[in-house]
Amino acid sequence: MSKFTFAFDSTETPEHDRLGGKCTSLAIMTSAGMPVPPGFAVTTDAFDAVMNQTTLRDHIAKHLAGLDPNDVVDVDTRAAHIRELIMTQEVPDDVREATISAYNALMELCGGEVPVAVRSSATAEDLPDASFAGQQDTYLWIVGLEPVLQKIRECWASLYTARAITYRMANNIPDEGLSMAVAVQKMVNARTSGVAMTIDPSNGDKSKIVVDASWGLGEMVVSGEVTPDNFVIDKVMMHVVKRTISDKHEELVPSGHGTVVRKEVDDQRRNTQCLSDDELMLVAALAKAAHKHYGTVQDIEWAIDADLPAGANVLLLQSRPETVWSQKKQEVKITSTGSGIEAITKSLMAQIGDRTK
């Protein structure tokens, strides 16, 4: 592939500056043998080629100069104008040709034209001290070359939404040198999906894995639009210590026309556990493997593909560092009312923390 694209299964070493947080993680997980859907990155070289061919960066800097993040109307106005500049900027021929070549290679690998997810991967996202989850755009069930090319451009522009701009300002993240890669990845036909953390986010207990799960695509879990089933799992013994089954009233599903739609969950499923205990343990094991691979607490997104057989249907969509408890310097006291092996396990985990995964 050219410098403008990078296959996730490439033998080259992924570089964060070229791939951004999300794509770097996907490439690393693929090379580690984790079950990641195939895809490729449109690298930051492509974004930079678009931005640098004219004085676009200078125009953006002028629009951001003197911006008051508390002036919502002004932020929205300036952000919209910057996105319009990016959306109308001409894409160099070599960038377009490289992207088309990578897309065609992915379709050949998948045995024909299949839907893809197009997701932003900024160089500042998924850093240990900041989480950009939801800051830039994700597009699901995109079918066909031209729609994919359009969504790549929209991902580039999403680097300058009002929300992204104010988030960077609030976290003292400079715009100088900021760039954007884009992930293009085979879409998972998710029966169930969600997130998992290799820490209990409610109290910082590193001896636990916490899994949130709901029907359909996971964006409604990530955005908080649905209350998911919640499971707390002992990280060493790998058994469920607490489960909460929620009223999952709505799901996000493919329409069959290259889009996704909200659908009311039928009465039989809405209060039913949305994955089997065997699948739950596979999700927990996947989170634990990601934690071990990266050597730090992870926040993963996962899905169960309805088209794949049991045992091979749990897929890893993303893994990033947890950013709340990892920043707390104080030790978290692990409380336990258990006895025997459970109490011993918790005592050990309190002492060794991250070293036992």
Image (spheres, rainbow, N blue to C red):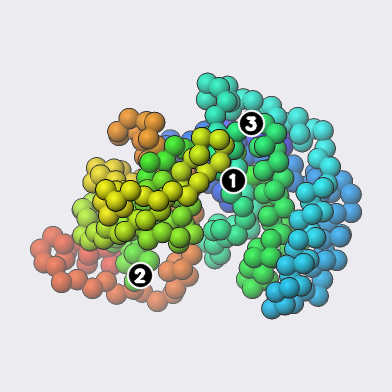
Q: Residues within 10 Å of mark 1 (few under 14, many from 20)?
A: some
Residue 104 in sight here = yes
Q: Residues within 10 Å of mark 2 (few under 14, many from 20)?
A: few
Number of marks in the rendered image: 3
Q: Residues within 10 Å of mark 3 (few under 14, many from 20)?
A: some
* Residue corresponding to mark 3: 144
Query: Can you give x and y, in whole percent of width and height, for residue 83 in the image?
Result: 76, 56
* Residue corresponding to mark 2: 202
How many angstroms separate mark 3 from mark 2 (CA)? 42 Å
Q: Earlier in the sequence, mark 3 or mark 2?
A: 3
Vertical position of residue 1 compared to residue 346: above or below: above
Q: Earlier in the sequence, mark 3 or mark 1?
A: 1
Q: Quadrant of residue 296?
A: bottom left
- Residue 83's tag is none
Foreground mark, 2 or 1, reads 1
Residue at point 57%, 37% (across, down): 258
- CB atoms at circles 2 and 1 under 8 Å apart? no
Image-based side of 23 in relation to 181, left or right? left
Query: Can you give x and y, in whole percent of width and height, for residue 45 in the image?
Result: 74, 43
* Residue corresponding to mark 1: 139
Residue type, mark 2 in image: Ser
How many angstroms separate mark 3 from mark 1 (CA)? 13 Å
Residue at point 89%, 49% (across, down): 54
Residue type, mark 3 in image: Gly
Q: Quadrant of the N terminus?
A: top right
Q: Return the residue nearer the eye: 301 or 31.
A: 301
How many angstroms separate mark 2 from mark 1 (CA)? 30 Å
Query: Can you give x and y, in whole percent of width and height, for residue 279 in the image?
Result: 29, 43
Vertical position of residue 201 compared to residue 125: above or below: below
Residue type, mark 1 in image: Tyr
Residue at point 67%, 43% (across, down): 151
Residue 173 in sight here = no
